[in-house]
């Protein structure tokens, strides 16, 4: 495969190749460019190339740089991919188009209240602690059914499941586990998303069913 001209084109080509191997349609995979810590001038080239889905870790950082960029590129879809504090729920609901880190009952309550107040029903991925790592956040697998029930009662749209596998361990089993959990707990038509895979492993994630990959370093380079 020839090397593409830009990092974005290279990542898109890698996703397409992974989809070909897995006999999937590349249109099923949303590339979320992780723009956290990067200034507007670093984001602009990707916007010019046509990238429209971006991921941020912190509400305040997104508030500081995205309103102006969205004025110029109104089709941008913003994804909150970092841990969300309950006291920032209303700000998150007002700004983001998807939230990938719903992981606990207190956040369900805060998001449900914020969505009722703002009138915005923002799709949420439930983050699952597939590696049993408390420091990363994520709902324990055993508590997933109860959390999903609570989210439905709060009228929070569930987009699917999200995971961050343990570092320095082969990610394949964790991606396969998230895919199985989505099949077991999701709708009968298997329409739930799987938000999994980052710069070092997104191709593997795509082969195992990822619908959203969160790629930063491969697009923007190493952070200083």
Image (cartoon, grey):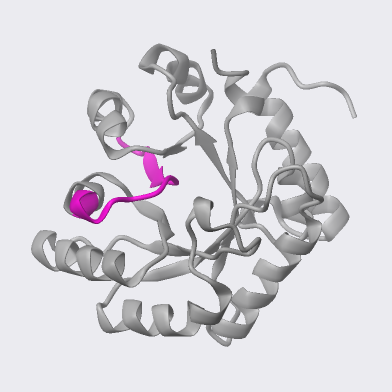
With respect to residue 187, does 31 lie above or below? above
The total of numbered circles placed on residues is: 0
With respect to residue 184, does 195 lie above or below? above
Q: Is residue 109 left or right of residue 135?
A: left
Q: Is residue 115 left or right of residue 97?
A: left
Asked if the stretch drawn in magenta spans residue 150, the answer is: no
Q: Is residue 134 left or right of residue 40?
A: right
Residue 212 at x, y percent in the picture: 58, 52
What is the span of residues highlighted in magenta in the rendered image?
Answer: 74-89
Q: Residue at x 35, y 39 (%)?
A: 75
Asked if the stretch drawn in magenta spans residue 77, the answer is: yes
Q: Residue at x 63, y 64 (%)?
A: 130
Residue 90 at x, y percent in the picture: 17, 53
Residue 163 at x, y percent in the picture: 58, 58
Q: Residue at x 57, y 21 (%)?
A: 220
Residue that protrudes farthest toward the right in the picture: 1
Q: Is residue 186 visible?
A: no
Residue 121 at x, y percent in the picture: 25, 64
Residue 56, quarter of the rendered image? top left
């Amino acid at each position: 495969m020839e090397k593409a001209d830009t990092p974005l084109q290279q990542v898109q080509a890698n996703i397409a190749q992974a989809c070909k191997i897995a006999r999937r349609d590349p249109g099923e995979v949303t590339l979320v460019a992780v723009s956290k810590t990067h200034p507007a001038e670093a984001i602009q080239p990707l916007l010019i190339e046509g990238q429209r889905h971006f991921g941020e870790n912190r509400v305040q950082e997104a508030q500081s740089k995205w309103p102006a960029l969205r004025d110029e590129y109104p089709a941008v879809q913003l994804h909150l991919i970092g841990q969300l504090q309950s006291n920032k729920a209303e700000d998150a609901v007002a700004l983001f188009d998807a939230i990938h880190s719903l992981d606990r009952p207190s956040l369900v309550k805060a998001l449900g209240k914020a969505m009722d107040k703002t009138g915005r029903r923002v799709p949420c991925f439930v983050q699952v602690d597939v590696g049993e790592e408390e420091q990363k956040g994520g709902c324990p697998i055993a508590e997933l059914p109860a959390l999903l029930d609570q989210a439905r009662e709060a009228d929070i749209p569930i987009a699917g499941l999200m995971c961050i596998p343990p570092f320095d361990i082969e990610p394949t089993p964790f991606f396969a586990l998230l895919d199985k959990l989505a099949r077991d707990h999701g709708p009968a038509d298997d329409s739930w998303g799987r938000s999994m895979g980052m710069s070092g492993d997104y191709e593997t994630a795509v082969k195992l069913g990822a619908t959203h990959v969160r790629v930063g370093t491969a697009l923007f380079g190493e952070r200083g």
